[in-house]
């Protein structure tokens, strides 16, 4: 059973920094692409960042250069560091995993991803 548990959300001012964590079942790291999505009220869920099993990453254009996705295999934990936050980054952020996609398809496949965490709220004030 795949379990994904996020933590680390919160409220910050524009320009601030947050780090999100996603604790995952151990076997995910050997065969699952993992990543982060977000969903703002009234909007579609969108891909933010994805990381393949070999550590290769890809990002949405809106966060490129500001967000960093990484994994700590020893801790079975996925991270998303959010720098230079903007009010438009305000959303519920979800950790996700799927073994059937590479990172490029993963980040564009919000409706098809198999496994999701419960979400953690990020709120950025101006």
Image (cartoon, grey):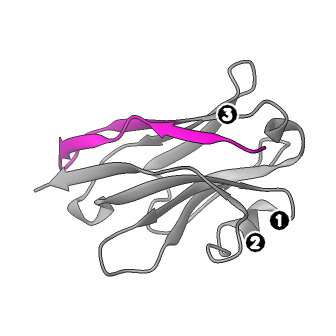
Q: Quadrant of residue 102?
A: bottom right
| Residue at screen point 53% across, 44% down | 68
Q: What range is drawn magenta here?
A: 1-21
Q: Pick out the residue farthest to the front.
A: 1
| Cα separation between marks 2 and 3 | 19 Å
Q: Nearer the viewer, residue 36 or 55?
A: 36
Reading the image, the residue beneath label 3 is 71
Q: Are marks 1 and 2 in contact (CB under 8 Å)?
A: yes
In this view, 6 is above or below 101: above
Q: Secondary structure at mark 1?
A: loop
Left or right of 68, for residue 110: right
Left or right of 13, for residue 53: right
Q: Position of residue 53 (x, y in %)?
A: 83, 44
Reading the image, the residue beneath label 2 is 105
Q: Earlier in the sequence, mark 1 or mark 3?
A: 3
| Cα separation between marks 1 and 3 | 17 Å
Q: Quadrant of residue 30?
A: top right
| Residue at screen point 85% across, 35% down | 27
Q: Position of residue 47 (x, y in %)?
A: 56, 67
Q: Secondary structure at mark 2?
A: helix
Q: Is residue 118 magenta?
A: no
Reading the image, the residue beneath label 1 is 101
Q: Is residue 10 magenta?
A: yes
Left or right of 121, for residue 37: right
């Amino acid at each position: 059973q795949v379990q994904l548990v996020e933590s680390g959300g919160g409220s910050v001012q524009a320009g601030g920094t947050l780090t999100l964590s996603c604790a995952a079942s151990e076997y995910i790291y050997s065969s699952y692409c993992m990543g982060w999505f977000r969903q703002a009220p009234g909007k579609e869920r969108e891909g933010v960042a994805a990381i393949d099993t070999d550590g290769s990453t890809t990002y949405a254009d809106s966060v490129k250069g500001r967000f960093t996705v990484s994994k700590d295999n020893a801790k079975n934990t996925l991270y998303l560091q959010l720098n230079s936050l903007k009010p438009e980054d305000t959303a519920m952020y979800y950790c996700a995993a799927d073994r059937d996609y590479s990172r490029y398809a993963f980040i564009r496949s919000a409706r098809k991803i198999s496994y999701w965490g419960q979400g953690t709220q990020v709120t950025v004030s101006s």
